[in-house]
Amino acid sequence: MTARPDATTPRPPWRPVSDASPTPAAPAPRSQRAARRSLRRMPDVVFDGPHRYRLVRAWPRGVAHALGELADDDGTTVAAQWFADPAELARAARRTPAPARVVGDVLLQPDGADTRLPALSEVLREDGAQLVAHRPGRRAVVRVCDPDGAVREYAKVVRPSRAADLVRRGDLVASLLAGAVPVPRLRDGSAVSRGVLRWSVVPGRTLHDLGADGGWTPAAARAAWQAAGRAVARLHAAPAEQVDPRHTAADELDALADWLHPAVAHGLLDGELVARAGERVTAELESGAGERVLGVLHRDLHDKQLLLDDGTVGMIDVDTLAVGERALDVANLLVHLELRQAQGLLTAELAAAARDGFRSGLAGPDLPAERVAAYARATRLRLAGVYAFRPRWRAVAGALLERAARG
C-alpha cells in the first residue's frame, strides 16, 4: 500500500523560547512573571523527610505541568506530579486520596494513590502484585506473580472511559497477527468497566535486556534482530483496512512538538538547535521525495517492546496501532540501536550486527531510503526531547539533538 504526500500538512512552530531573559530589577507585569514561572520544571531531586527521591523520568503536559517517576536511594519508585501553579497543585492534592502528599511543588502519589485510576490501589493489594509503572491519571502497569514467583499476568489500569477501546485494539492486533507474532491476550475482562485489563504474559526477554546483559555475540544479536525484522514485517503486512486510526507526517510533527516545546521552555535543550532540526525534519517529512509505503504500524516500537523466546519475537504495548508509513517503525528501531550504543548498553559491533539482522529480516516492498532517513531524523529529535526529561541521560539527549540538526 502506498500513498503520496499531503501538501496541506501543517507545520508546528519550531521556535526557541525567548522568555528566559534575566529577571529585571523592577517588578515585571503579571503576564511576564507568569511566563517566567512557567520556565520552572519538575526538580531533579525531591526531599521528603528522610527520603531523597531523584527524578528518573518525566512526561511534560505543556510547560506548567508534568507527570514523573521518582526513585528513592534504595530503588523504590513513586509516581509524582509537578505543577508550576501552586493553586493547581493544591487542587490536585485535594482530589487525590491518601497517602498522597505535597512536598514543595510536587505531589507524591505512592501506593497507587490516583483519583483517575480508582482501581489501582485495589489491584496493588492483591497477593503477588508489584507496581511496574504508574503515570498519574493516565495508566499503570502491575505485574502479578504466583506464589512461586512466576509472572501470572500483567494488569494494566487505565481510566475506565478508555478501557473498552484498549480491549478492542488488543483483540484486533491478535486477530491481525493470527498467532504468528505473540502478543498479550486479555485473560480476564470482568473488571474492564473499572479500567482493569488483565493481559497474558508474552514469553521471553526483551531485546533491550539481552543486549545490555553483555553476553551476546554478534551472531546472536544478528539472529535475534532478524527475528524482530520478521515480526515487524508480519505486522506491517497485516490487513490495513481493519485498522481505523491513521498516523500521518503531521501527527508525527505534533508528537515531536509535545516533547520539544517544554524541553526548550525549561532550558533542557538548545532552542536554536531544536529550531534548526525541526525545520529540517518538517521539510523532509513533507517532501515529495520517496514513495510512501503504508502498513499497519506499532508506532512506538523499540527494543523494550520486543521479546525473544526460542527464536520467536513477540510484541507488547500494541495499543498504539495505526496505519501509516512503514518507515516510521523501521527508523524508530534503528535509531534506538544508536541510542543504546550512546548509552553504553550495546557495543558498536553488536549494534551493527543488530542493524544488519533487522534489515535482513524485513520482508515486503523495499522502503525508500529517503523516507527511512526522514523518520530517523525525526526519531532522533523526538528522543532528544524524551531523554532531556531523564536527568541521567541529558548528555545523550544533547548528542541526539546535535545529530538531528546536522545536514
Image: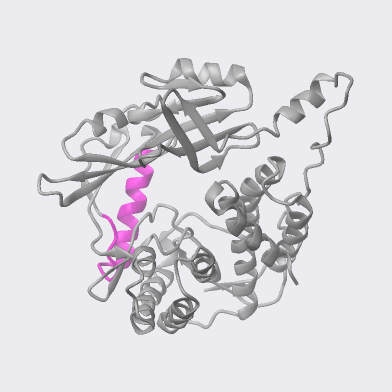
Instruction: Assign the C terminus to one quadrant of the image.
Output: bottom right
- Nearer-the-camera pick, 248 or 257: 257
Span highlighted in magenta in the image: 162-184
- Residue 7 image position (x, y, % from top left): 73, 63
Residue 152 in percent (x, y) is at 17, 49
**Above or below, 40 relative to 130:** above
Tell me if residue 111 is in the magenta stretch: no
Q: In this view, does 233 lie to the left or right of 91?
A: left
Residue at x 63% of width, y 62% of height: 400
Q: Is residue 254 left or right of residue 193?
A: right
Residue 211: horizontal and vertical position, in percent? 38, 69
Q: In which quarter of the image is residue 70?
A: top left
Q: Is residue 390 visible in this depiction of the protein?
A: no
Q: Which colour scheme is used?
A: one colour
SS assignment for the magenta stretch, majority: helix
Residue lying at the far left of the rendered structure: 148
Q: Residue at x 73, y 69 (%)?
A: 406
Q: Disc count in the image?
A: 0
Q: Residue at the spot x=61%, y=52% of the render?
A: 385
Q: Is residue 11 left or right of residue 290?
A: right
Q: Which of 175 and 111 is in front in this view?
A: 111
Of 394 and 230, the residue lying toward us:
394
